[in-house]
Image (cartoon, rainbow, N blue to C red):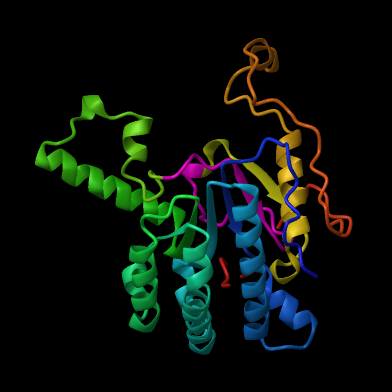
């Protein structure tokens, strides 16, 4: 079913959405299929969600595509995932460029095989001037690892004399994080029924709203994204303030009416959220 042009208008949207795309392997197992088939169908979900986010006007979408720990998976599965990642980057190049999307990557990208890294780097460079949305692929990525890398960079800056301890604060440290150029993470979604964040965006998720859904990633499409944004819009975001303070300030952090997806409802999905994905996260 096509969901083109079905953006729900007039609602407060998250600026930055992160997704732990989980459940590809389980989806395939339930159907008696090879795990890689689950990853292949999961890549179709990636395409639909990226299009939906761009049409909604989301500023940044970060997808947990391959974790630092995923390298320990069976070699044939890792090889298949790398081929799917390469195919995605090549096949979606025109759409990314035509829709003014900037492709970014976070994680230990240098560890990727060259047949993946070369087209990835080329598209990152060619899309660097695009401004309508940032699509961020977390590859060979870990949240703790990214914090350690930021701390290492900070220590090097201190040794070079460009940063002093007295100058350091939360915002200063954030500039050393690989996501420092992105809007703050507003909404974190996990599919497949697991309710943990599995080393994803640990620093960035400090004040993010979390949405967990039982739906496996290959079945997660545009209506389910709308449902997650609906859950986000209903919540009161206080950032340490009281509810009365938020109301008195006339802030836009308060709850909003629900989003009404223009397409099929998400099969009874509500606000519960998420085993693997394009590529697995766990």
* Magenta part, dominant SS: loop
* Image quadrant occupied by the C terminus: bottom right
Between 178 and 60, the one nearer to me in the picture: 60
Q: Quadrant of residue 23?
A: bottom right
Q: Position of residue 92 (x, y in %)?
A: 52, 73
Residue 108 can be seen, yes or no: no
Residue at image location 65% in from the left, 49% down from the top: 56
Residue at image location 38% in from the left, 56% down from the top: 145
Residue 169 can be seen, yes or no: yes
Q: Is 15 left or right of 227, judged from the image as shown?
A: left
Vertical side of 49 occupied by 249: above or below: above
Between 16 and 56, the one nearer to me in the picture: 56
Direction front: furthest residue: 98
Is 198 in the magenta? yes
Q: Quadrant of residue 63?
A: bottom right
Direction right: furthest residue: 268
Is 206 in the magenta? no
Vertical side of 157 occupied by 1: above or below: below
Q: Position of residue 176 (x, y in %)?
A: 31, 44
Between 68 and 2, the one nearer to me in the picture: 2
Which residues are the magenta region? 182-204
Vertical side of 34 occupied by 240: above or below: above
Residue at image location 76% in from the left, 43% down from the top: 230
Q: Position of residue 13 (x, y in %)?
A: 65, 40
Q: Is 230 left or right of 83, judged from the image as shown?
A: right
């Amino acid at each position: 079913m096509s969901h083109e042009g079905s953006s729900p208008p007039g609602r407060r949207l998250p600026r930055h959405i992160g997704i732990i795309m989980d459940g590809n392997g389980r989806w395939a197992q339930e159907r008696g299929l090879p795990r890689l088939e689950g990853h292949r169908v999961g890549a179709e979900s990636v395409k639909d969600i990226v299009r939906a986010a761009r049409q909604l006007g989301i500023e940044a979408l970060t997808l947990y595509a391959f974790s630092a720990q995923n390298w320990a998976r069976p070699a044939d599965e890792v090889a298949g995932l790398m081929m799917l990642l390469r195919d995605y980057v090549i096949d979606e190049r025109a759409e990314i460029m035509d829709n003014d999307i900037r492709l970014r990557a976070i994680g230990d990208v240098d560890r990727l095989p060259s047949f993946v890294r070369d087209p990835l780097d080329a598209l990152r460079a060619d899309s660097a001037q695009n401004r309508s949305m940032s699509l961020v692929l977390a590859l060979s990525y870990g949240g703790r690892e990214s914090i350690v890398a930021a701390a290492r960079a900070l220590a090097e800056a201190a040794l070079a004399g460009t940063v002093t301890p007295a100058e350091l604060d939360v915002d200063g440290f954030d500039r050393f994080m690989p996501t420092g150029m992105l809007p703050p993470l507003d909404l974190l979604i996990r599919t497949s029924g697991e309710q943990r964040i599995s080393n994803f965006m640990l620093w960035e998720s400090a004040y993010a709203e979390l949405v967990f859904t039982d739906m496996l990633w290959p079945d997660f499409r545009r209506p389910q994204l709308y449902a997650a944004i609906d859950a986000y819009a209903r919540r009161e975001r206080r950032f340490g303030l009281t509810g009365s303070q938020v109301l008195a300030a006339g802030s836009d952090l308060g709850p909003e009416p629900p989003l009404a997806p223009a397409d099929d409802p998400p099969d009874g999905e509500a606000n519960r959220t998420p085993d693997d994905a394009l590529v697995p996260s766990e």
